């Protein structure tokens, strides 16, 4: 139960941070390009890399911090960070075809899925 609560709290904070990042980026750069999410995805990917080394590889803090930061906060802040670490794990394991399929498939099929959801929902109305 502690892990689930840690993930929930981290996710809530991450979601609010993503919203704040988007509002601030819109204020700074305007809304012609989605700078907020673009920058959030990059920052989240950097932070999950740091967390991976400090928490998973070096075990400098308790495993509970993995749940709070990597699953909760970064999951709420950006799921792109998880996508990035999983892609790197496949690449580092030498699974190049799996990595390419995962990377291209995730991006293309997610966009296609979004389009199908939009078109399907619009057709119902």
Image (spheres, helix red, strand yellow):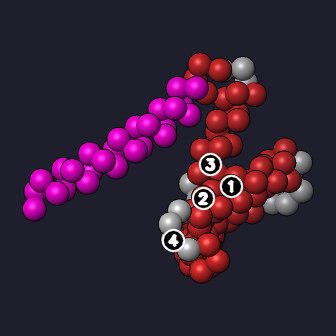
Which numbered disc flags the more N-terminal residue, 3 or 4?
Answer: 4
**Which residue is labeled 2 in the image?**
38
In 3D space, how far apart are the residues under numbered discs 4 and 2 (Cα atoms)? Answer: 12 Å
Which of labels 4 and 2 is toward the front? 4
State how many labels appear: 4
Which comes sooner in the sequence, label 1 or label 3? 1
Number of other residues with Cα within 10 Å of mark 1, as a class: few under 14, some 14 to 19, many 20 or more? some
Mark 1 — residue? 42
Instruction: Give the quarter of the figure containing the N terminus.
Output: bottom right
Is residue 104 one of those drawn in magenta? yes
Residue mark closest to the camera, 1 vs 4: 4
Q: Is the residue marked by circle 3 packed among few (<14), some (14-19), or many (20+) residues within 10 Å?
A: some
- Marks 1/4 in contact by CB < 8 Å: the verdict is no
Circle 3 sits on which residue? 82
Residue at the image position 70 percent from the left and 35 percent from the top = 88
How far across and down, in percent of the image, does residue 102 sit? 54, 31
Label 2 SS: helix
> Between disc 1 and disc 4, whose residue precedes?
4
Q: Is residue 30 left or right of residue 28?
A: left
Q: Which mark is residue 31?
A: 4
Tell which tag, 1 or 3, sits nearer the viewer: 1
Q: Which numbered disc, 2 or 3, marks the residue that appears first in the sequence? A: 2
**Secondary element at image label 1:** helix
Q: Are marks 2 and 1 in contact (CB under 8 Å)?
A: yes
Q: Residue at x 58, y 26 (%)?
A: 100
Residue 57, compared with residue 87, is above or below; it is below
| Residue 116 makes an appearance in the image | yes
Residue 7 appearing in the image: no
From the top left corner, tell me how far across and down residue 72 is, in percent.
61, 63
Residue 78 position, x and y percent, is: 58, 59
What residue span does the magenta drawing correspond to?
100-125
């Amino acid at each position: 139960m502690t892990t689930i609560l840690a993930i929930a709290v981290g996710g809530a904070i991450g979601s609010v941070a993503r919203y704040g990042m988007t509002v601030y980026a819109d204020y700074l750069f305007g809304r012609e390009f989605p700078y907020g999410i673009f920058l959030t995805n990059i920052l989240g990917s950097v932070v999950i890399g740091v967390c991976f080394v400090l928490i998973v590889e070096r075990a400098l803090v308790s495993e509970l911090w993995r749940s709070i930061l990597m699953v909760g906060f970064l999951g709420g802040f950006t799921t792109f960070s998880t996508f990035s670490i999983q892609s790197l794990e496949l690449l580092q394991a030498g699974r190049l075809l799996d990595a390419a399929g995962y990377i291209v498939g995730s991006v293309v099929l997610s966009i296609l899925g979004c389009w199908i959801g939009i078109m399907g929902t619009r057709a119902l109305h």
